[in-house]
Image (cartoon, grey):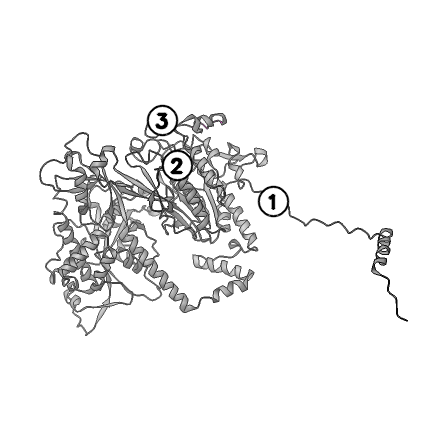
Amino acid sequence: MPRRRLPLLLLLPITLTLFLLFPSPPPPPRQPPHQPQPQPLPCGAAPSDATAGRWVPTPEPLPPPLYTSSCPFHRNAWNCPRNSRPPVAALSWAPARCGGGGGVVPRIDAAEFLAAAGGRRIGLVGDSLSENLVVALLCALRSADGGARKWKRRGAWRGGYFPRDDVVVAYHRAVLLAKYTWQPAENSKELHKDGIKGTYRVDVDIPADEWVNVTRFYDVLIFNTGHWWGTDKFPKETPLVFYRGGKPIEPPLGIYDGLKVVLKSMASYIEREVPSKTLKLWRTQSPRHFYGGEWDHNGSCVSDRLLQEHELDSWFDPRFGGVNKEARLVNSAIQEALIGTDIQLLNLTYMSEFRADAHPAIWLGKKDAVAVWGQDCMHWCLPGVPDTWVDILAARILHHFKQANESDGGCSHSTVPKKRGRRGNQSESFAACDKQKPSKIRRRRRQISPPAAMAAQRDDEAGWSAEAARRVWGGAVPLQVHLHDADVTTLPPPPPFMTLGPRIGYLPLLVPIIKAHFSSTLPPGIDTVWFEYKGLPLKWYIPIGVLYDLLCADPERPWNLTVHFRGYPSEILTPCDGEDSVKWSYMNSLKEAAFIITGNSKNVMNMSQADQGALWQSVMKGNLDGYMNISTRLKLGPFEEDCLVRTSSVEGQQGSDEPESPGSGKPCRVPVRLYVRSVQEDLYDLEDALPVGDWESISYINRPFEVRREEGRSYITLEHALKTLLPEFFSLKASRIPDDSETAPQASDSAPNDDPDVTPRSCEKVESSASLSQQEANVANKGKIVKLVRVQGIEVDMDIPFLWVANNLKNPECYLHICVCVGTRKREPKDGR
């Protein structure tokens, strides 16, 4: 009999009845996921720690200073102990958050900081107040690494490398952050009616060259700008004109409105171009403390008194229109520009407003500095307030590093034992991460085969060389040329003329545009034009860039020169007949260089007149492409370690007794001109160097460098080349200086044998160390030490390959010009006394 099924509708009431009579037990309550309690930030690491607090006496016992006036990273104008300023009070900042206002921001532990930052790079970009901060940071960190050395790569203005932990800290000077360039007035007579000498073009959407290429180099970037945005820096005679997309902004912007546009544009660029993992900070304005007037109107800050809380608004609130209103005014624009970005604010303004007692004031370390520049009530004494900035900044950075390490699964640079040297550090840090994430990293390594990597490296090197050539040919020195009082025939005297002097150019080539500017006031008669700098007549055949590097130990911008149209100092300078003399000097130098490189100058002598003219025009106009089209046919480079030149014409002139075999050769030689400037004091900072009073204190040396490969040396460094070229300055021992007859022949001595036009400058006083006898040279140079080496305006790292420098930083006449500043070495006491 088939089973009968109950309809489904009849089962539903039964099920509901059973559910109501026997309800199921309720499920256990869901436990919320365990969330660790957030750890309180260390004192000084919270953004509010600098904006709420007070200054208190540093707790006893006072710790010893982290650095003294002898710190090699110091800047003289801020070195208050050395400049005999009364000591700044020993105070510490006590944030309201820390210990109920009783705790103070702990001083940076330099060793701990460097260990945590191992393998990382910290960069500051902005104006001189960022430099004030970086000097304090560099000096503090040096207390934990005595092997620290100066670092000025990648366009850095000032910096340091700490080899023990492979840390770089550097400052890039970009006072407006945006790119700005000087544009002299095209029609000076017409524009002179309004008193305009020229304008500064500000491209609001283009970062300054000094930092545009380092956005991905640093792990921490701290920005600032503000102190240059005023009429004291850009008066109505030389105003700022703002551009966007290559076109002037209409209607024209005032300085403050232009600042706001630049801030928003640069903040957007930073957020777009700087990697998200990079810590991005924007430091607020450092307050000034001028009392009684601006810096140029007898403003003063000679005080040992801190301001009180109730005094701050009267000093700094823009509503009261005081001379120190700049900081809060700029800060409001900064805060508005950073809205919606991932850039963190580093607000150091409030805590610094109290410290009217801590500026250099009249203790600037230079004679007549106050008379010229007024008191310095903007920058800070060191040691001083910036040391507390460093403490707060270090706390922020360490907290960021800790978070970054935790997010990377504990892969920390600081936990890996390090070898000395950057490559060792990086490889070990990479290996530590490799253990954490082996598959991902190893796959990445296998993506690039060795041939492809070598090709990529060659492409990079070619790109660097092309960029170096572009910068050499496009480099310029901003000049402000004043007419000498003796040549002024009208009242009022004419304003100075501002222009750009090409680094590879020569001063006489600027005479036509300079004369046009001063023509209405010049006396009648025949012009005999010459230039001077601080009383020193300038040699016209030395390139402008070399003169600037040599005579301005501390770069001066603009470079203030005086032009004379009468009274030529023929006892000091060789005669100059304008462009023709400069062209003759250039071609003469090119022949000398050709003789040094190839053993003769016939490749230059055999140039057609048309090629000579085109080559000279390319140099005058800075046309690199036109120059390369002709110069490559001369076969004067590039220099290589394995290159050989035939020696048939050279050995005979050197008087060699050895028979010459067919095809014999010798290593190639690099034409080098060295300019050695003596500084008679042992200075802490070259900005204190006395101006060059005469050319007798400059050694002008033609000394070719012979390229020789040595076993155990992967490449020839600049340091090795300079030790060879200037042994007398690189060794305490009496070094033997080779005579000209023992080295490669001086072009000025040898070239006349096959070219009557290549003659030594017999009418010029060439002070060369090679002209001294061996004993005289050792005595003259005993106790001197190299303090500075500059090539094309760059303070070159001594470990850089010399041949790269020679190939990429040489001038168009194929000479490598090197400026060397030597100072007096400290004498060691005898017999332990």
The secondary structure that dominates the magenta segment is loop
Query: On residue 694, which mark appears?
Result: none
Residue 676 rendering spot, x and y as whole percentages: 24, 49
Q: Residue furthest right?
A: 1
Q: Nearer the viewer, mark 1 or mark 2?
A: 2
Q: Mark 3 or 2 closer to N-term?
A: 2
Residue positioned 46% across, 34% down in the render: 352
Residue 562 position by quadrant: top left
> In the image, what residue type sits under mark 3?
Gly
**Residue matched to label 2:** 257
Residue positioned 19% across, 37% down in the render: 483
Neighbour class for label 1 at 10 Å: few (<14), some, many (≥20)?
Answer: few
Residue 165 rendering spot, x and y as whole percentages: 46, 53
- CA gap between label 1 and label 2 equals 42 Å
Q: Are marks 3 and 1 in contact (CB under 8 Å)?
A: no
Left/right of residue 817 with respect to residue 601 in the rendered view? right
Left/right of residue 95 with respect to residue 788 in the rendered view? right
Q: Mark 1 or 2 closer to N-term?
A: 1
Q: Mark 3 or 1 closer to N-term?
A: 1
> In the image, what residue type sits under mark 2?
Asp
**Residue matched to label 1:** 39
Residue 63 rendering spot, x and y as whole percentages: 49, 39
Residue 263 rendering spot, x and y as whole percentages: 42, 41
- Dot 2 falls on a residue whose secondary structure is helix
Range of residues picked out in magenta: 304-308
Residue 721 position by quadrant: bottom left
Q: Are marks 3 and 2 in contact (CB under 8 Å)?
A: no
307 part of magenta stretch: yes
**Residue matched to label 3:** 293
- CA gap between label 3 and label 1 equals 48 Å
192 part of magenta stretch: no
Q: Nearer the viewer, residue 533 or 457?
A: 457
